[in-house]
Amino acid sequence: MFIPYEEFARRTDEIRARMTAACRLAGRDPLGVELLAVTKTHPPAAVEYAARYGLRAVGENRVQEGVEKRAQSTAAIAWELIGHLQSNKAGLAARHFDRVQSVDSMKLVLQLDRAAAELGKTLPILLQVNAGNDPAKHGVDPAGAPPLLEAALAGKNLRVDGLMTIAPLSTDPEVARRTFASLRLLRDQLATRFGTPLRELSMGMSGDLAEAVAAGSTIVRVGTALFGARE
Ligand SMILES: *Cc1c(COP(=O)(O)O)cnc(C)c1O
């Protein structure tokens, strides 16, 4: 059985308190970090909970699952794709998501731009970078980020909001710290070089959100700590 709303609200309060504490430690304004509720594998009720609590958006990692859940939902909330996107699903993603955080190839940039043009919309995106050089993770290599950004900025129907990363799985918090610091540095370098703010740094999940906030995260993507373990 899925958790009751009160349990979700209690957990969300607790995560927000952790985010605020991490902001205080880092001398940051807590309003500068958003909590994205990751509803993947959870029932449509998870999305309704997030909306009822007042969160701006939910994250789904699979296109098909997100599309189906959205069709069943009346929640006034934004939908973000955070999982790997195959280019043959680019059109579907452009149509049904409000932002795609997992853009990591030239092919995807071109297909999303074309799909957005056909839909007559501007699609906000983040570039996913494999900042931890983890062979198990998707994302463009840091060295490939400048040409990818250049192509994305040239896409007339794309709006590049920033960068996203997933830290390698590790019990050593230093691994996450290093990954987040390198994404932050890359963002700062790209913002200067291309003259664009790249305001969003989507980094940090249930297990490493404090490290991410310390390194400048503006979006933490949290699933397990809000909704419980996935099957
Ligand atoms: C599942 C997922 C999350 C949330 O992870 P939790 O550990 O459950 O908080 C965050 N980001 C991405 C890209 C995910 O796929």
Image (cartoon, helix red, strand yellow):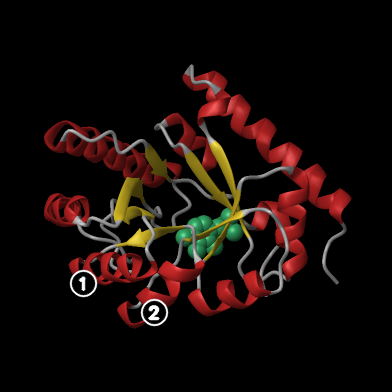
Label 1 or label 2, whichever comes before in sequence order: 2
- Residue 97's label in the rendered image is none
Q: Nearer the viewer, residue 44 or 21?
A: 44
Q: Position of residue 41 (x, y in %)?
A: 64, 72
Q: Quadrant of the N terminus?
A: bottom right
Q: Nearer the viewer, residue 129 or 92?
A: 92
Describe the element under mark 2 as helix, strand or loop.
Answer: helix
Q: Position of residue 100 (x, y in %)?
A: 41, 60
Q: Which residue is mark 2?
A: 89
Q: Position of residue 192 (x, y in %)?
A: 16, 31
Q: Which residue is mark 1?
A: 107
Q: Quadrant of the C terminus?
A: bottom right
Q: Amino acid at mark 1?
A: Lys
Q: Quadrant of residue 109?
A: bottom left
Contact, mark 1 vs mark 2 (Cβ under 8 Å): no
**Label 1 vs label 2: CA separation?**
12 Å
Describe the element under mark 1 as helix, strand or loop.
Answer: helix
- Left or right of 32, for residue 3: right
